Amino acid sequence: MKNNKREWLVLVNLHAGSQRGERDWPEIKKLLEKAGFDMHIVFTEYRNHALIMAKDLIEKEGFKKIIVVGGDGTFNEVINSVFKQNRFRTMEIKVGLVTVGIGNDWGRMYEIPESYEEQVEILKNEQFILQDIGVVKYEEARKEDNRYFANIAGMGYDALVAKKTNVMKQKGKGGAIVYLLNLISGLFQYKNTLLEIEADGKKIFSGKIFSMSIGICKYNGAGMMQLPYAVPDDGLFDVTVIRKISKYRIIKNIKNLYDGSFINMREVETFRGKKFTVISTPAHKLYLETDGESLGHSPLNFEVIPRAAKLIVRAKYAISD
């Protein structure tokens, strides 16, 4: 690192968790200082700012240890900075998270505790997993783009709820209640989408879907277990497709989203694979979100990058260094 100034890059999103980041940052900073972290601290100011800053600081200053103080969206931005920088191999950069967001679904996968003191202790231990990462190519404004993700990409109804929630966040309104209201209102706005899905070159599905999830870990939507059998370092995506379904059936079974048992419903299919292609008709685009961040739409091409990210986790999930 240039001049050996600081060991850890700390990116702080004060707006995360409906301003919870701003309220709790003084406490978190004291805990990090008490634990002896040698830190260069920067604050995000707008969407994708963490991606831009982290990429720049990795390439110019040589940071290889990063702490994210934020939610799943900020974490996603930093993961993208790791995979879009050109100085180090991705697994040379160690990333940890202090969860101050609303969903905290990536942390839920690894049973990251709510206590900041315990979270800082996990960071201090620096034990890690080499986790798979997903990358998706999508279309936006008639141009192809791509995004990396450490947790789950959601499509259809999931993407609509994420978009509605993100719009509310930009207006300063967030929290679990807002998300729940968007879940309900989205039911009456979303129209099932006709699409085709290919897995590793073979067509596996054709028909109308309500929602689709593809990912590395188990949870999204603030605790919904969309991919109950996902293993984060097996080199495979897990996929859940909910076919066309009545609003009554959704409301009746919504509680089953939280323990994963909804996959036993007749309208649900699950798949596994390394590469997935999703194609819909031009008139019925399938929209996308990754780790809660609203993106573009179909056609979509997903590919898993095995064991490519070094992420700090609890000891029970870690591998030996």
Image (cartoon, rainbow, N blue to C red):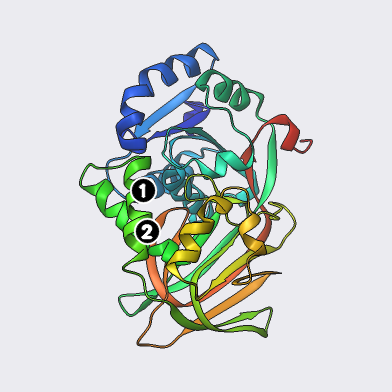
Above or below: residue 26 compared with residue 185:
above
270 or 29: nearer the viewer: 270
79 or 113: nearer the viewer: 113
Q: Could you classify mark 2 by the number of other residues whose Cα lies within 10 Å: few (under 14), some (14-19), or many (20 or more)?
A: many
Q: Which residue is mark 1?
A: 179
Q: Could you classify mark 1 by the number of other residues whose Cα lies within 10 Å: few (under 14), some (14-19), or many (20 or more)?
A: many
Which residue type does callout 1 highlight?
Answer: Tyr
Contact, CB < 8 Å: mark 2 with mark 1?
A: yes
Above or below: residue 174 compared with residue 314:
below
| Residue 161 circle label | 2
Residue 158 place in picture, x, y as percent: 44, 62
What residue is drawn where x is 46% and y is 38%?
61
Q: Is residue 28 left or right of residue 230?
A: left
Q: Is residue 178 left or right of residue 287?
A: left
Residue 266 place in picture, x, y as percent: 63, 71
| Residue 46 circle label | none
Q: Which image quarter: residue 236?
A: bottom right
What residue is drawn where x is 68% and y is 51%?
232
| Quadrant position of the C terminus in the picture | top right
Viewer can see residue 150: no
Which residue type does callout 2 highlight?
Answer: Val
Secondary structure beneath label 1: helix
Residue 317 place in picture, x, y as percent: 73, 37
Q: Is residue 98 left or right of residue 92?
A: left
Which residue is situated farthest in the left direction here? 171
Residue 281 place in picture, x, y as percent: 42, 88
The first of marks 2 and 1 along the sequence is 2
Secondary structure beneath label 2: helix
What residue is drawn where x is 31% and y is 36%?
18
139 or 109: nearer the viewer: 109
| Whole-number angstrom distance, CA of label 2 to CA of label 1 | 8 Å
Q: Is residue 242 left or right of residue 129?
A: left
